Image (tube, rainbow, N blue to C red):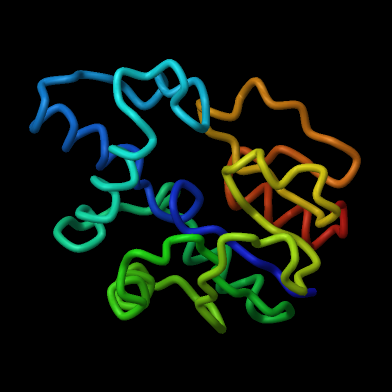
Amino acid sequence: MRIAIDLDGTLADIHTVFLEELEKQEDIVHSFEDLENYYFDEAPFSLKKFHRLARENWKNREIPLTDKEIPTHLEQLSQSHRVDIVTARDDVDRKILRNWLNRKNVKFQDLVVDKEKTHLNYDVLIDDSPSYIGDGMKILLYDRPYNKEVETGENSRRVEDFSEAREHIERKLV
């Protein structure tokens, strides 16, 4: 099986780092759970600000994994599946992203930068963005506060963590 895994918000906990920077720079305090919408429609900051700070954070901060067990699960998946990291993050040097993945011991075959992930030739996409649901590709929606209200569809399932994602893939539930 060919598996695509998103970077920001799925592997990399960019949102927590963003909120820390937002508090430092503008004294705006928000918890991760306050992020109720993927596009931050009701947040006191813009999506543009998020992308600007995220880009800076990739260059200047150490970003944690969203789940410390990710390396273990991806190592297991990589033994019998092709695992690629697919990101829309085209504003950060790929070397920075690759170095981060290597430092975090994330096992993958290729790093693909593409804003439209669903047209790529993958069997399943693990992503925190609900925008890919219904585009034809099988989606494992990585559960985050900002996508809680989203209904999954025929080709999608919500997963709490990478253990559950791996289970769905290994049991061919997607």
Q: Position of residue 86 (x, y in %)?
A: 56, 67
User: What x and y, as percent, mark residue 117?
Assistant: 65, 62
Q: Residue at x 27, y 55 (%)?
A: 55
Q: Is residue 117 left or right of residue 44?
A: right
Tell me the residue at 70%/47% (across/down). Answer: 132
| Relative horizontal placement of residue 2, taking residue 14 as reference (left or right) | right
Q: Residue at x 47, y 59 (%)?
A: 7
Q: How many marks?
A: 0
Q: Report the residue that reaches farthest toward the right.
A: 154
- Which image quarter is the N terminus in? bottom right
| Location of residue 87 with respect to 32 vertically, above or below | below
What residue is at 65 percent from the left and 54 percent from the top?
126
Q: Position of residue 165 (x, y in %)?
A: 68, 52
16 to the left or right of 82: left
Q: Quadrant of residue 30?
A: top left
| In the image, residue 123 above or below residue 37 | below
**Relative to residue 21, is residue 33 depicted above or below?**
above
- Is 65 placed above or below 143 here? below
Q: Position of residue 25 (x, y in %)?
A: 9, 32
Q: Nearer the viewer, residue 124 or 74?
A: 124
